[in-house]
Amino acid sequence: MAFRFTPSVRLALAAFLAMMLATASARPMLASRAGPPSEDPFYDPPEGFENEAPGTILRQRTIDATFFKTIPNPVETHQLLYRTEAIDGAAVATVTTVFKPWFPMDDRWISFHTAYDSSSPKCSPSNIYRAGGETKNVIVAAEMLIIEAYLILGYVVASPDYEGPDAAFAAGHLEGCWYRLLGRRHRHGLGSSLHPHYAPDLNVHGWVQGGTPVNLTSTLLYIDGTAKSGFTPIAIDGLSKPSAYGERWMPLLNRIVTPQGETALEFAETHCATAVLDNFKGKSIFSPNFQSLGRDILENPVVSSVLSQNVMGVKRENAPTAPMFVYHTTQDNTIPYSDASQLVDRWCGYGSDVQFTTFRAGSHSVTEVFGIPYVMDFIDNAFDGKVPSGCSREGAVASFFDLLSLDSSLADVIKALIELFVSAGQDDDTILQDLKDFVNAIF
């Protein structure tokens, strides 16, 4: 399957990259330091906000956004504090960042759920995007490049803090409630499931998810003791937040977690994803150094109940009602491929329209880069009403060389994405040689 941007889009990309360089030299970076959400009154909802309907905008501001951590992003950028719901239905407020391109289409928009994968509120996208804000979340920095591609095409893009105000990572049903206001993955997967009930009035044309953690238990077992095991303390800390399952989880954790385990959870609470991955690399949460129940922790009724509530595709009434594009790699080193395949089978059995693309190469991170042209093709078809009904599966033998079909004007973007995604997963032996060959071929 070959993809090429149209000449007008290639021109826009080249012009945009040139403009970014000119902007960088003409406009210096803002020196002011943006404080974290805990020190920013913008994030505090006004008194009585809980009486407002879900989706109500409580506060808004215009911000100076940054592009790729280093230079100002010259697009109009707004942040909205809005009312949403916690796991138990209680009112909470979170923020979404809205990017408006120079020549926006007025009949469509995209919600991009960047994979910030953190239980630390300071790592939330709204804080990362602001000039002078926290810049150590390499994943958000890389995915900003993808958002720029959609802006170039004329889409208004919203990027919500979908984990909520306290960064409840892995709490899928909380993550799925972002879109009552608006319109990279667990968040879009659960959003598509909650859409028919939480926001049925929303005219959603399609959903995209890749590398989705369908089942938290199997994902935990899959990554335990590996280079990706740091996602587990992030998930435990995220699920323990007040807006998630804190009332049920904290008494158990206080009883079984060791001092060393407490240190790991505290580190997750105060650092972004890549730092936690490095800190907990190769370790196991089943170790007596972390908690006292060993593998029996999965049989604990509190733990098993919470984990079972976050399995996707179980209920027919939660199946997507808008077309869905799912992509995954068989070489995924973070999320089991079999879980995604089984989820597609369930959704198709419920009558949903699903396109499933399987990549035969690339790790969890770099498959997002491989998938860019496929995703853009699906989005165009979804907005034009051209997505075929029913279910389909196709394989894609992708490599970095396939990205050359995107046009050489994207070289800077591609190089930046490659460097950032691979730096977030240096253990990806299956792709490193291909990466070296690719970079040598075009640079």
Image (tube, helix red, strand yellow):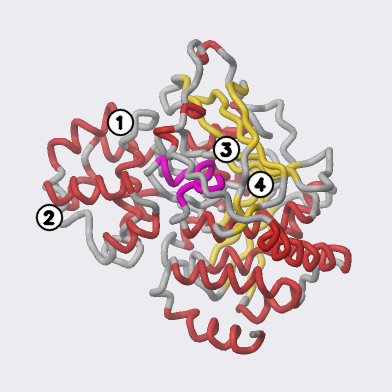
Contact flag, marks 1 and 4 (Cβ < 8 Å): no
Residue type highlighted by circle 4: Trp
Return the x and y of residue 438 as percentages of the image width and height.
60, 84
The CA span between labels 3 and 1 is 23 Å
Percent of width and height locating residue 180: 62, 29
Q: How crowded is mark 4: few (under 14 residues within 10 Å), some or many (20 or more)?
A: many
Which quadrant would the C terminus be assigned to in this image? bottom right
Q: Residues within 10 Å of mark 2 (few under 14, many from 20)?
A: some
| 393 relative position to 35: left or right | right
Q: What element carries label 3?
A: helix
Residue 254, quarter of picture: top left
Q: Check the image and report above or below for 74 versus 406.
A: above
Task: Please name the residue that numbered disc 1 is placed on.
Answer: 246
The CA distance from mark 2 to mark 3 is 38 Å
- The residue at which mark 4 appears reads as 207
Q: Which range of residues does the magenta coloring cover? A: 121-134
| Count of numbered labels shown in the rendering | 4
* Position of residue 103 measured from the top left corner of the image (x, y, whole percent): 84, 47
Q: What amino acid type is highlighted by mark number 2?
A: Asn
Give how far apart the Cα atoms at labels 1 and 4 are. Answer: 30 Å
Describe residue 66's horizontal placement relative to residue 122 as left or right: right
Q: Name the residue under label 3.
A: 193
Cα–Cα span, label 2 and label 1: 22 Å
Identify residue for label 2.
289
